[in-house]
Image (tube, rainbow, N blue to C red):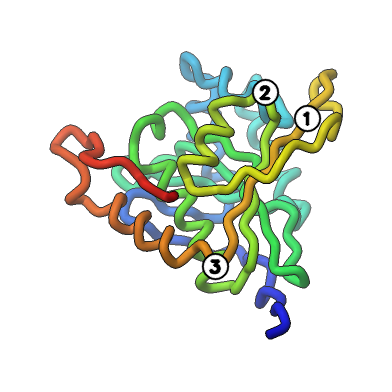
Amino acid sequence: MSPSPAKSAPQPIVLEGRYVRLEPIGQQHAADLYAVSTMAGGSERYRWLFTDAPQSLAEMEARIEQGKAVSDPSYVAVIDKRSGKAVGQQGWMRIRPEHGSIEIGGIYWGLPMARTPLATEALFLFAQHAFDELGYRRFEWKCNNNNEPSKAAALRFGFQFEGVFRQDMILKGESRDTAWFSILDSEWPAMRAEYQRWLSPDNFDVDGMQKTRLVTR
């Protein structure tokens, strides 16, 4: 059977989960995102991103407006449903529906998301939407090859390591080798079931700590 393209590029819709809600990023998220970016330790999470931490709320607002002016990448805010606040952002990138391939990137998951189910569900909602609703064949993750936490996260989430593009780009005055990872549509059904099992409230104790780890391979 010949491979099929995806239905379309992701549209600006809300993706609702149990712990987080993903919604098109806008100025209503600027103050929350600026707050998590500038809290103690928050700016360090920009080390591997294309930009540094915003130095003012006005700069955060300007970045959001600049991002909304293009369709690729296309960013969403990650809303903690318990607090109602934006605690991170992530984007659709390298959007190629004609090839059935799409990337999650530009990820800034703030410290309030650390060691909670929020980040895992934010990733899951993107993957589920890409594979199950839009019909993508390939879901990508890329990062600086020196970014060991990002590479570890990709493997934990079930992405397969595909190799390194050497001297791929110059970023913040440094040469970047880029590590490539992917999940394919044929791998997704088993992974979907494991994500759903792990994200179940039954898998967390009263302190919100996981009882069992995510097993994607």
Check disc 2 and give the amino acid type. Asn
Specify whether residue 175 is in view. yes
Cα gap from disc 2 to disc 3, whole angstroms: 29 Å
Q: Residue at x 22, y 36 (%)?
A: 208
Q: Is residue 121 above or below residue 2?
A: above
Q: Name the spot of residue 200 as percent of width and height, x first.
A: 25, 54
The quadrant in which residue 90 appears is: top right
12 relative position to 208: left or right: right
Q: Name the spot of residue 91 as percent of width and height, x first.
A: 63, 48
Identity of the residue furthest to the bottom in this view: 1
Check disc 3 and give the amino acid type. Ser
Q: Please name whichever residue, 199 or 217, is drawn nearer the observer in this view of the structure.
A: 217
Q: Residue at x 43, y 58 (%)?
A: 191
Q: Name the mark on residue 146.
A: 2
Mark 1 or 2, nearer chain start: 2
Cα gap from disc 3 to disc 1, whole angstroms: 28 Å
How many residues crowd mark 1 within 10 Å: few (<14), some (14–19), many (20+)?
Answer: some
Q: Is residue 143 above or below residue 43?
A: below
Q: Residue at x 67, y 74 (%)?
A: 6
Label 1 sits on residue: 177
Q: Nearer the viewer, mark 3 or mark 1?
A: 3
Q: Residue at x 21, y 39 (%)?
A: 211
180 relative position to 155: left or right: right
Q: Name the spot of residue 133 as percent of width and height, x first.
A: 53, 73
Instruction: Tell me whether the residue at label 1 lies in contact with that at label 2, contact meaning CB atoms closer than 8 angstroms.
Output: yes
Check disc 1 and give the amino acid type. Asp
Considering the numbered disc 2 on the image, is that residue within a helix, a strand or a loop?
Answer: loop
Considering the numbered disc 3 on the image, is that residue within a helix, a strand or a loop?
Answer: loop
